[in-house]
Each structure stands twice: as structure tokens, then as C-alpha cells.
Image (tube, rainbow, N blue to C red):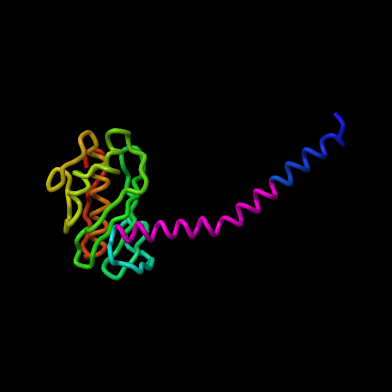
Amino acid sequence: MNVKALIKPVAVLAAVFVLLLALSAGLAPTAAENAAAEQARLFDTLLPGGAPFTEEAYNGEDTAIAAVHRGSTGYIVETVTAGYAGDITMLVAVDFDGAVVGAVVREMEETFGLGAEALSDAGFLSQLIWSRGELAVGDNVDALTGATVTSKAVVKAVNSASAFVTGADVSSSATEWGG
């Protein structure tokens, strides 16, 4: 094959690559601004009237806590707990009095139709709102049908967030099989 015949297609591909790279770099600030705006809307929904929020360093021992955001009326605590099929990332809003005022599952890989119901099952999630202190599946929280491990993971996340705000010690709330 002739080398001269390859020069033009390679030059076109290189120009397209450079153009896409420039577009990506130019749109990066817009993507960051959109993500920040989405986070602000979500935080305002979880803890109404709590803005402005500032991220605080978390140096505690609770491995379920990934990030802490302090607002004017409470905290939004990002948690990561082990579910049945993978990690469950949640945002839990707790006011300064220790009441859970909002919770949302941000990411999960649980079984469709079972554990994945933790994303949207109003009956399950409503058990967590306005709670104070340690929750326990089978005691003061009814598990999602067929998703006990997922239910325990969500409850552990809420307990961790509540304990952070109140200064309580989260003893176990295990999500291990049989725990």
C-alpha cells in the first residue's frame, strides 16, 4: 500500500482527535458546575434550609462514613456499606438534634426486584425518617421482603450517620450473613 494514501486519513483522524480533546477540556468546567448544582439541589432536598454546606474532614473510626457535609441545620453524611451484591452508597441527612430527616440511595448493585427496591420503596425508607438512635432490622425496622442483607446495609448507613452527629458509638449493625 502507498504511504501517501495513508497520510490523508491519518491526518483527518489526528485532527478529529485534537478537536474532541479540545471539546472535552472546554466542557469539563461545565460538567463540574452541573455536578455541583445537582449536589446542591439534592442537599437542599435532604436537609431543607440547611445551606450552605461545607465538607469537613472525617477522621473517625467508622469505615462506613465516606464524607461529611456540615450545613446550618445539620449534617449530610455520605456512607458506603456492603450490601448483598456490592457496595451501597447513601446520603443521610441528620439534624443537629439527632433526627434523621432525609436519606437517599445514590449507588447500588443489588438484585433487581429485591434489594434494588431500597432505592424507591417508600414504606421501607419511611421507617428511617425521623428516627433517633440505633435502628435494627427485625426490631424497629421491617426488612424489604427477600432483601434482608440489603436492608441491614441501609440501616447500618443510617446508624453510622446518626451516631456521627450525636456522638454515639455504633456497635455493630452487621451486614454479614447471619449478622
Q: Nearer the viewer, residue 26 or 149?
A: 26
Residue 43: x %, y % from top left: 33, 60
Q: Nearer the viewer, residue 20 or 145?
A: 20
Residue 28: x %, y % from top left: 56, 56
**In the rendered view of the protein, which quadrant contains the N terminus?**
top right
For the image, the number of numbered tags is 0
The image quarter containing residue 62 is: bottom left
Q: Which residues are magenta?
A: 17-45
The outermost residue toward the bottom is 72
Residue at 14% across, 43% down: 138
The image quarter containing residue 148 is: top left
Residue at 54% across, 59% down: 29
Magenta region includes residue 60: no
Residue 127: x %, y % from top left: 17, 49
Q: Is residue 10 left or right of residue 111?
A: right
The outermost residue toward the top is 1
Q: Main secondary structure of the magenta part?
A: helix
**In the rendered view of the protein, which quadrant contains the C terminus?**
top left
Q: Nearer the viewer, residue 85 or 129?
A: 129
Residue 173: x %, y % from top left: 22, 49
Q: Nearer the viewer, residue 42 or 59?
A: 42
The image quarter containing residue 54 is: bottom left
Residue at 70% across, 45% down: 16
Q: Is residue 149 left or right of residue 29?
A: left
Relative vertical location of residue 143 with respect to residue 45 in this rendering, above or below: above
